[in-house]
Image (spheres, coloured by chain):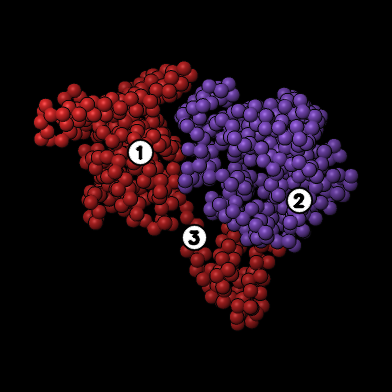
Amino acid sequence: MEGQQKFRHIYIEKRVMDHPRTREILAHFPESRVILIDHYKAVFNRRGQSAALQHQSQNLILAAAKDTNVYPGAPVCQDFGNAHFYYTSCTMNCLYDCEYCYLKGMYPSGNLVIFVELEKIFAEVEALLSQFPVYLCISYDTDLLAMEDIAHYCTAWSEFAAQHENLTIEIRTKCGRTDLWDHLPRCERVIFAYTISPEPVILAYEHGTAKLDNRLEAAAEGIAHGFPVRLCFDPMIYVPGWEEIYHDMLVQTVKIVPLSRVRDFSVGSFRISESYLKNLRRQEPDSAVVQYPFTLDRGYYHYSQSLTERMERTLVEELGRMVPEAAVFRWEEPNE
Amino acid sequence: MIEIITALHPEAEGVIRRLSLKTEKTAFPFHSFRSEDGSIRLTISGTGKAVAAAAVGCILGRYEREELSTVQLVNYGSCALYQSSSTRNESESTGQTKNEELYLVNKLTDLDSGATYYPDLLVRLNLPEAEIITGSRVLGENPEKNTKQGLDEDSDDRRQMANLAASDGSRQMASLAAVTGRQSEFVSNREILPSVTLYDMEAAGIYEAARLFLGPHQLHFLKGVTDQGIDANGRIDVAAFRDRMETYADMALPYIQRLADTSRQQGRFPHEQEAALEEKISTALHASVTMQLQIRQLVRYAALAGFDVEKIFEQCMATHDGSCRDRREGKLLLEQLRIVIAGD
């Protein structure tokens, strides 16, 4: 299991030290040293942390749910046409270590937090569901599927979604496991969304994640097991020779994944808020993908308009040729 | 740069000798020792949080802001063993009893304020870990010793001071118990790793001061148990103390050397070369402040991505007959440079 060699230290908020989920998670890490804390922020929000170093020796923090855990979806994120788009962070940070990840710009720490009081988060979602249908992304600030053995949150959320007809959930992942499909409950409103990147980008920048073939095989296996699967060619990352690299990626995708059975696709190039990029550049001073000279536009950094258009259009057109009937969602800047 | 801070000279002697540190003359009121290559310094702060924090301010205040990222601060010294609750016998694996261990501290609590601090424990060496509580008095010290001299033995003032002293001492113990009590219960009920609680008089003060300058990955606390508070006569056995600290110096050395090795190995990107190139391009393009920032980002990215920026720049300049008359032309050239480097 991917996380087993991690977590030399597990910090636990005293108020959840007797929580059943705390005990379940601890059982996976008998060798970890436990340190009791009053509040997760005492560790997570320390000044001057190096997320890059912490990712090399990541620790786990188990905490109670916050007062508010469900938020409106961010403008830079794809809402797939859903009117009531929300996201939740039942876990903060990721087992993986992608250089360009906005989490390094958003969070002060590279350590991983699991909020064990999932039931409180469910209650918040139910309060929204009493007003309107909700499209909820639960794996933005983390990779829940990669952590399924540790926390079983994909299972818990799938069971919850099955009980609520007006809830649709997206679980975003770069995980390449195929064995989980035998155990996960299936619900047509729980979408497994694979981030698909070219192999050279994965090798250079997406440290610890599954290789392209493994992700594609996992997606194909999910489809074969009857799970709704989305493929996200998002974020597209500029590298010299990107046309050929992304073409090869699509060729490989077609070989492994039955594209006609993919629920939908999303395409988008890299974009990030101004404040996040500033922090991210501090954390990753030697990363080419992060130090790229992006264009600043209304509070967001992205590739230039012309490069963005070329990259995304090229991919959309090639995808359209492969799957003419595909539903392809391209991120568009929100109107002011 | 490794900055070691200890409270007392007998704590420091073993490390000074092993690292061949020599006295360093400074303007500050603390004894300071430095290695021949200058990469390790040891400062003796004196006892107590306030002087330790003052020493930290002197030590770290010397550095320019950008230099601080290269500093690792180690608080090395003695401590008392306040509490140990275990369900696993560590002495079986280490061959030592709990009161002969050098510990790496993973949690610091200031007994007076209740504040807690957590260093990042990123150096992987086989040192046992413990939490530490920092107080303002020697553990178990009879506070009556601090009463004013010259008071009449039978005076109301003397009795009042004695009562206060007794309650202060009880408060110390009660405060310590409150900090550690619940954790012990959790540990013994859950059969997880042993919990050892140490006590000293500097660590939390050092952390509180040092965190203004350094990140939690740059702060290290190595504490060797030398006592369980003072004995019945209110004294610490100095000879035994020195012996223990010699043993701990041997244990601490690999940790300090690992930090020193990591510090030396940390590759620094040749920003000096970048800075020179930025200067050259900025001057040539008559760059405004905004343009300079753009140039800096372009040069940084290009260097990381493996571009020969200087060559590209010269090629761009060649398209303008090798010269740039003013800022307007400079902006055009900058855009040209950006298009080539950014793949636009």
Choose between B110 and B246: the one closer to the eye.
B110
Residue at 24% from the left image edge and 38% from the top image edge:
B11
Kindly tell me whether residue B210 is visible in this rendering. yes
What residue do we see at 77% from left, 28% from top? A164
Q: CA distance from mark 2 to mark 1?
A: 49 Å
Observer-nearest residue: B210 or B223? B210
Task: Measure the alpha-carbon separation of dots 1 and 3.
Answer: 37 Å
Mark 1 or 3 closer to N-term? 1
Secondary-structure class at tag 3: loop
Q: Is residue B271 left or right of residue B222?
A: right
Query: In the displayed structure, would residue A26 be above or below residue A172?
Result: above
Query: Mark 2: which amino acid?
Result: Trp
Q: Chain of mark 1?
A: B
Question: Badge 3, how many Cα within 10 Å: few under 14, some, many 20+?
Answer: few
User: Whole-percent x and y of residue B39?
Assistant: 34, 51
Residue A270, image x and y in percent?
Answer: 69, 52
**Residue occupied by mark 1:** B204
| Colour that chain A carries in the picture | purple
Q: Does residue A270 sit above or below B88 in this rendering?
A: below
